[in-house]
Image (cartoon, helix red, strand yellow):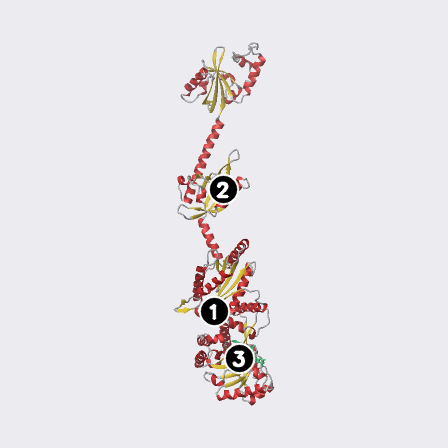
Amino acid sequence: MDNRGDELAWQADPVTPEPDADADPHVSHVYSHEQQRRFRVALDSSIDAIYLIDREQMRFIDANETASTTLGYSHRELLQLGPQDLKPDAGELDQIIKRFDEVIRSASKTGMIKTVHQRKDGTRLPVEVYLRAMLSEGRQIVVAVVRDISARLQAEVALRESEERFRVAFSQAAVGLAHVAPDGRWLMANQKMCEIVGYSQTELLTMRFQELTHPEDLPIDFELARRMRAREIHEKSREKRYLHKDGHYIWVNLTNSLVRDEDGNPKYFSTVIEDISRRKRVELELQHLANHDSLTGLPNRSLLQDRLSQAIGYANRMQRAMAVLVIDLDRFKNINDSLGHESGDLIIIEIGRRLAAQALDGDTLARLGGDEFVLLLSDADEEDVTMLAQRVLELVSQPLMLQGHEFYPSASVGISQYPKDGHDGATLLKNADTAMYRAKAAGRNNFQFYAHEMNARALDRLKLEGKLRRALEREEFVLHYQPQIDIRSGHIVGMEALLRWMPPGKAMLPPDEFISIAEETGLIVPIGEWVLRTACAQNRAWQAAGLPPVRMGVNLSARQFKQHDIAKMVTQVLQDTDYPASFLALEITESIVMENPELAAQTLHKLSDMGIHLSIDDFGTGYSSLSYLKRFPIDSLKIDKSFVHDLTTDTDDAAIAKAVIVLAHSMKLKVIAEGVETIEQLDFLRQQECDQMQGYYFSRPQPADQIAELFRSGRRL
Ligand SMILES: Nc1nc2c(ncn2[C@@H]2O[C@@H]3COP(=O)(O)O[C@H]4[C@@H](O)[C@H](n5cnc6c(=O)[nH]c(N)nc65)O[C@@H]4COP(=O)(O)O[C@H]3[C@H]2O)c(=O)[nH]1
């Protein structure tokens, strides 16, 4: 089939190029053999097939090597064939001949047709044929340069298919797909995208993405677009909000990339959008839970801390003042203890609601747990804060109905101000808290600004108070007991329960160091109840262990005594500990009784009617007269240890003690001398027929187990 160098074939029907009529007449038009060989080589080097066709005979009169290799015919075979033998599609041959003639006739003598050639092996080849007509030795010759376009057609088909695949994928994708012009116009949007935003495709294509974007998200979009244009980033995913046609915002996850044209100019943004509203809802709910108090829905400590740092940052930048108010409900624990946690919760919710209604936009009201709220006031000077603190007190103290009763809650408010009282959130909170304790100490239902002058001692005291608040639940209290002895028989006849506090890692604290704080804060109420319960239970345990039954003396503080339900509380404790009232002595100081004698008389009667022994403690330190005390149902008097101390040295004290004993006896009251340390003091008291003594001379206050040993030893005076 190879016919390279086939001189015979070449010479068999040589076609010499037609001499150009305008050509230089001096140039010879007779081609040399060498020239013809060069033409032949050039012709055979073409990657396109080239045929020379005798129009009249419709026969190939020459063809190059590519023609042979493409069609599978040898050169010689080809020269036996004509265009019709290449079997163009039915009816096409006429078209081809027509085209040949047009080319021959046309001025340019060129043309192009697309057809199909059949190879020798029967396979068919799509081709593009470039035609040129020429006259050679009186014959019309058509030169056909034939280009195999099968690869191109295949590529076109592949492209069409891939475009179709893209079209289907685009329109049916489960995520929203869109093209957005650099100016924000939607150029294309698939079905899913339309569903996500609720607009039809036609509607969407008249809009810009800016119209659908949440205003807060727009600046970030613009910035990202800028960075993409500047080629700083290529692709970016982010979460943002689109405005649905219904008017609600939907969260989407959006991936954007910038497509450029061949010159590198931005063409459009290709955008993939995934509806993440459901996930976002759950996420936002979780975030809300983590940052809010579940009872009131108010921000919790963690969110407050965030807001505090933001507010400080703002105040700092804008040179503004801000304030932190710590609001603590007064006596909340009492309510919780007496009415139960559910009622306590209702109060917290109600107070939270009242305070929230007062907070302005930009302020934060948080609940730190328990009965403590914090109000963060941005941009507020001292005058604003004072007015607001007053308003807070008013709001809190509005009566509220609970279990059919009317309650008058109150709160103590501590205030710290930025930048005066601290530069960071923790310090501001701590100082507002300190000021709040100050407000409590100042009698509650008031507010206090933090003052640097709150000296170290006051702070220590405040710290102590904080610790005291937690001491009960942390079980840091213990009771020691001090025996009371019948002077005549020498037997132990009673016991006084005395409170001790053992803060972890510290030395034991005597009551004088914390009772007054407990009293001021109201903590004495729950602590006192604990003392009563523990002392009764202890005495019950001693009796159950076979130790001699004695009466247990328990101190009642002023505050406890003033509780309207003190008798109820005592009854409950007696019931709970299965303790007989006759074995209980309640010790009340003279000053408590004298503070409000009418009320004291009522309460004392209630307690006495229950069979409880009542004793006036520290007698002699107040200004009451014995005859006055006669009006109260009292069983015994305790001579204060300050008189006992100097009995043997100070004749005045001795005279007072003597008189008290005589008079008390005349009123049928028993007399107990406190603080007896020496035999001399005891002798004096014995001489005066004092009934009982209590003091280091016989025993110091001791823990329960040592008292049990003392009992067992049978020791007497
Ligand atoms: N110098 C001296 N002192 C003696 C002697 N014998 C006893 N004492 C102390 O005298 C105090 C007697 O208790 P109080 O007058 O009721 O005075 C009590 C009482 O008013 C109060 N207190 C103690 N426990 C409670 C409590 O549970 N509730 C209340 N409300 N107050 C309590 O704290 C006060 C002080 O208690 P304590 O420090 O335990 O002090 C006790 C006791 O330890 C002695 O021979 N010499």
Residue 351 at what x, y percent from top left? 44, 63
**Which of 72 and 598 lies nearest the eye of the viewer?**
598
Secondary element under disc 2, as helix, strand or loop, is strand
Residue 544 in view, yes or no: no
Please tell me which of labels 1 and 3 falls first in the chain. Answer: 1
Residue 621 in view, yes or no: yes
Dot 2 and dot 1 residues touching (CB under 8 Å)? no
Residue 281 at what x, y percent from top left? 45, 51
Give the quarter the ligand 1 occupies. bottom right
Query: Does the closest atom of ligand 1 sit within 8 Å of the Cβ of label 3?
Result: yes
For the residue marked with disc 2, what is the amino acid?
Asn
Cα distance between the residues tagged 2 and 1: 59 Å
| Res. 643 image quadrant | bottom right
Residue 442 at what x, y percent from top left? 51, 69
Number of the label disc, if any, that sits on residue 256? 2
For the residue marked with disc 3, what is the amino acid?
Glu
Which quarter shows the C terminus? bottom right
Number of the label disc, if any, that sits on residue 674? none
Q: Residues within 10 Å of mark 1 (few under 14, many from 20)?
A: some
Please tell me which of labels 2 and 1 falls first in the chain. Answer: 2
Number of the label disc, if any, that sits on residue 331? 1
Q: Residue at x 47, y 29 (%)?
A: 154
